[in-house]
Amino acid sequence: MTELHRLTLAELNEGLRARRFSSVELTKHFLARIERLNPALNALITVTGDQALAAAQRADQQLASGEAGALAGLPLVHKDIFCTDGVLTTCGSRMLSNFVAPYDATIVERLSQAGVVMLGKANMDEFAMGSSNETSYYGPVKNPWDLKKVPGGSSGGSAAVVAGRLAPVATATDTGGSIRQPAALTGLTGLKPTYGRVSRYGMIAFASSLDQAGTLTFTAKDAALVLRDMAGFDPRDSTSVDTPVPDYVAALDQPLAGLKIGLLKEFFEGLEAATAQLIREALQVYERLGAKLIEVSLPNLPLSVPTYYVVAPAECSSNLSRFDGVRFGHRCENPKDLLDLYKRSRGEGFGAEVKRRIMTGTYVLSAGYYDAYYLRAQKVRRLITDDFARAFQQVDVLMGPTSPTTAFDIGAKVDDPITMYLNDIYTIGANLAGLPAMSIPCGSIGGLPVGLQIIGPHFGEAKLLNVAHGYQNETLWHRDIPKGYE
Ligand code: GLN
């Protein structure tokens, strides 16, 4: 039998249902890998071994009695941004390093009901602010493809967990690229759904108008399997949209003949030659499947990064004001008075990048600068959204690179926030416009993976997954496993 960690989630699901192995066996297998491989990767903050084995036993009983949920017995790791009842939930911050959540996030609850077995909580950039997983209070995560390199961020722990085969799926969040960029840098399939498709209830807020939960998996089919149970209306999240959840798995095999693919002109200008070549080769696969390539231009797209770095900090400065040393998390020792309590609790609890964002956000929202920065950014955001809407009148999906570079060295960009922010130059547009987008592996440069980005119209997840699955039927990049993790 193939080693269990080499199988996709869909294959593991079939194996469990055919009783070729039990959930307890599967869970023990992954827990042993976590014990052996996580010390070098630093991908998990918390491992919930006993809880996992108890859940696996329950799943085995349900599988035996025929009452099992769609994902019964499948191991999973949650990004540590999702509240998990009775389990430490840190958001990668000292501020929450003592916070045991008193309830489950909606997606945690839904996936548990579907039968998944949570193995633990993944490391991440502090409050999901970062592109390299170096802002975490718990230390940097290493990329399984090369331990000297970053895995991307902010969902770097989730990505390293799946790429290192410590779990077949991890949840993640994407505010400006934090699912897709780590997927690209670690050779995974990353899916960021439409804003409002997946509930944000119990997901610690960074920038509420941009944040969206999704998955990191080996394949598009695996993502379809998980999204079916994650997605859907939630009355506890007022931005969650009440539209039916299609059967994403059933839609995977639609033929791609006649598919209209828009190539984003702005994404190819200045793109490094080796990456451009791999993207072109991926596009040729689609052409062989009968797709048509059409060049499209989104003239306002180059304004995405500056727009995002006004909107996201503005929202984060407001969201993070709840961490005051009174109600949640870190509280300083012996405060002199209330102001001292606020100042020192926040000063000690937050790291440098989070403080930089709070200060930027407070500045752009201040009375004297609101019109010049925040209001203007909102207007540009609308222009970018309109650009995308026009493009989708012509084409079914848009394609381009996910990240301007492959995984870079740990430490290489930490002292240069602007260079770090430019990692998300290709991903942020989809967040500003609320669109669903994916990254799938499409080759490697010098042994490091490269991602192809696919962006769809609102609620176009089924089409995106279908398009990604079609490519994965023709290629084997998604089956590559880093050396030492086979
Ligand atoms: N890298 C971006 C940032 O630092 C995006 C982060 C994210 O998507 N959570 O804000």
Image (cartoon, rainbow, N blue to C red):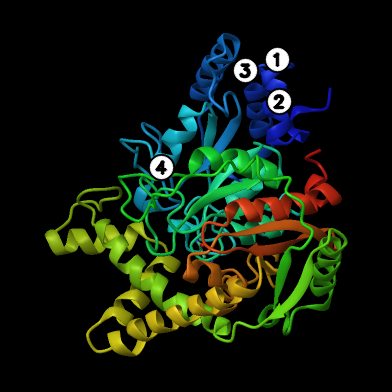
Q: Which residue is mark 4?
A: 89
Q: CA distance from mark 1 to mark 3?
A: 12 Å
Q: Residue furthest left?
A: 337
In the depicted view, which residue is nearer to us: 117 or 144?
A: 117
- Name the front one of labels 1 and 3: 1
- Name the front one of labels 4 and 1: 1
- Name the front one of labels 4 and 2: 2
Q: Which image quadrant for residue 415?
A: bottom right
Q: Which mark is residue 19?
A: 1
350 in relation to 399, above or below: above
Residue 222: image x %, image y %? 66, 40
- Left or right, residue 303 beside residue 267: left
At a point 42% along the width and 55% down the height, the residue shown is 196
Q: Amino acid at mark 3?
A: Val
Residue 320: image x %, image y %? 31, 61
| Label 2 CB sits under 8 Å from any ligand 1 atom | no
CB under 8 Å between callouts 3 and 4? no
Q: Which residue is mark 3?
A: 24
Residue 423: image x %, image y %? 61, 71
Q: Which residue is mark 2?
A: 14
Q: CA distance from mark 3 to mark 4?
A: 25 Å
Q: CA distance from mark 4 to mark 2?
A: 32 Å
Q: Amino acid at mark 2?
A: Glu
Q: Quadrant of the C terminus?
A: top right
Residue 354: image x %, image y %? 41, 65
CB under 8 Å between callouts 1 and 3? no
Q: Reading the chain from its start, which is encountered first: label 4 or label 2?
A: 2
